[in-house]
Image (cartoon, helix red, strand yellow):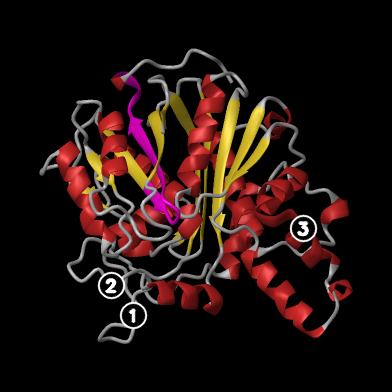
């Protein structure tokens, strides 16, 4: 378990793409109108095309890679990356100077892998297309490798794979790299495109996929008494980070831990989770907690840990109520929506927030992975002094 130093890393840009919309404002409006996905969440192709058009100015993709048919997760990651970059106002040349690229995914190019497996059932390995073979060979690192080639990246590239905690693991690595001077800027990107009967069946066998309700639809209801489960949704998210001061909320601390009690079940006593929350709360008041809460029975253990550390009156919510579970991307989706809550002075479920507060965002995953991030406004701690 590790805790980051208590100096700020500022968020300069946000990019978000999901079935609810493109960009943080579209998501905020949809959530405030209480639009809720059901069954599963698939991003319309037109919305993906809009994301690429809106953020692609100044980024020319190398022609030599146009013959590859990119996995859907890579295309989503590219759209979110371009959106965050445009939101930050960073010039394209920054990707060639001291900027780290930190990717997160629960599986990598999973849909392409499944297509390749189908092809292998009827032919020899030589029957795979060049594109499918490339994705299979690269594994989960395909997201980072593809974005680095498409954007002609010259800085460090790293892909984190830690189940549903992957995104906050990548955020932690980015923050630590900025603080120790490995890079001057960083962009964290998380994407997951796993809506497929293969994965839905597997999660159903594990007992975490919500069954159809009385209305014949699957719902995700975090903290509900029945703990029925969740449904899968596609999503991609990206944040631009720097030590240079910025008006937006900043990352004050990150924490990684492990709940090593079971491969898929979580510790009912939430010992590690309680430790991480205590480290990030640091004895101070917390404005809200954006919980991992997936609508499963584990929600009650998570909520109990939050109450032990942050008190009974601290607002607690989960965006999965509206978006479902985007697996490896969900932690960064949550962090971005937490940042918007600070900006809007309002929680996702409509409770008002005072200026200057701190919040904690949680992500957890199979295998015991836990990631947490504390957001705060600049005057709540020491600010960075380095320029872009």
Please give the residue where the numbered disc 2 appears in the rendered image. 228
Residue count near mark 3 (Cα–Cα under 10 Å), binned few <14, some 14–19, many ≥20: few
Residue 337 x/y as whole percent = 37, 47
Residue 272 x/y as whole percent = 31, 41
Q: Are discs 1 and 2 less than 8 Å apart at CB?
A: yes
Residue in view at x 48 percent, y 78 percent: 201
The label number, if any, that marks residue 196 in the structure image: none
Determine the secondary structure under disc 1. loop
Q: Which residues are magenta?
A: 363-379
Residue pushed farthest top? Answer: 385
Residue count near mark 1 (Cα–Cα under 10 Å), binned few <14, some 14–19, many ≥20: some
The Cα–Cα distance between marks 3 and 1, rounded to whole angstroms, is 35 Å
The label number, if any, that marks residue 211 in the structure image: 1
* Position of 83 relative to 36 (above/below): above
* Position of 191 relative to 194 (above/below): above
Please give the residue where the numbered disc 3 appears in the rendered image. 137
Q: Earlier in the sequence, mark 2 or mark 3?
A: 3
Q: Is residue 283 magenta?
A: no
């Amino acid at each position: 378990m590790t805790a980051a130093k208590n100096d700020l890393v500022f968020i300069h840009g946000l990019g978000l793409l999901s079935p609810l919309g493109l960009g943080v404002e579209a998501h905020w409006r949809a959530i405030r109108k209480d639009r809720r996905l059901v069954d599963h969440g698939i991003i319309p192709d037109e919305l993906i095309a809009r994301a690429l058009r809106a953020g692609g100015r100044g980024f020319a993709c190398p022609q030599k890679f146009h013959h590859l048919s990119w996995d859907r997760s890579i295309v989503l990651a590219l759209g979110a990356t371009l959106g965050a970059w445009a939101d930050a106002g960073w010039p394209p040349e920054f990707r060639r100077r001291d900027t780290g690229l930190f990717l997160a995914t629960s599986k990598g190019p999973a849909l392409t892998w499944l297509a390749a497996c189908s092809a292998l059932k009827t032919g020899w390995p030589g029957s795979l297309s060049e594109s499918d073979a490339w994705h299979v060979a690269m594994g989960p690192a395909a997201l980072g490798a593809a974005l680095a080639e498409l954007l002609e990246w010259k800085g460090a590239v790293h892909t984190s794979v830690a189940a549903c905690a992957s995104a906050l693991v990548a955020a932690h690595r980015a923050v630590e790299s900025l603080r120790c001077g490995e890079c001057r800027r960083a962009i964290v990107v998380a994407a997951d495109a796993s809506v497929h009967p293969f994965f839905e069946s597997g999660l159903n066998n594990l007992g975490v996929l919500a069954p159809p309700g009385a209305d014949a639809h699957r719902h995700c209801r975090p903290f509900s008494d029945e703990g029925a489960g969740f449904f899968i949704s596609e999503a991609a998210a990206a944040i631009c980070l720097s030590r240079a001061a910025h008006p937006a909320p900043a990352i004050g601390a990150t924490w990684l831990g492990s709940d090593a009690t079971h491969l898929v079940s979580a510790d009912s006593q939430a010992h590690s989770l309680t430790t991480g929350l205590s480290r990030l709360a640091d004895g101070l008041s917390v404005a809200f907690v954006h919980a991992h809460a997936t609508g499963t029975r584990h929600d009650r253990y998570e909520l109990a840990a939050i109450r032990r550390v942050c008190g009974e009156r601290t607002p607690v919510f989960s965006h999965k109520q509206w978006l479902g579970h985007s697996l490896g991307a969900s932690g960064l989706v949550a962090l971005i929506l937490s940042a918007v809550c600070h900006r809007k002075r309002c929680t996702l479920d409509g409770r008002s927030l005072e200026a200057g507060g701190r919040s904690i965002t949680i992500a957890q995953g199979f295998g015991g992975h836990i990631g947490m991030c504390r957001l705060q406004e600049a005057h709540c701690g020491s600010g960075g002094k380095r320029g872009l």
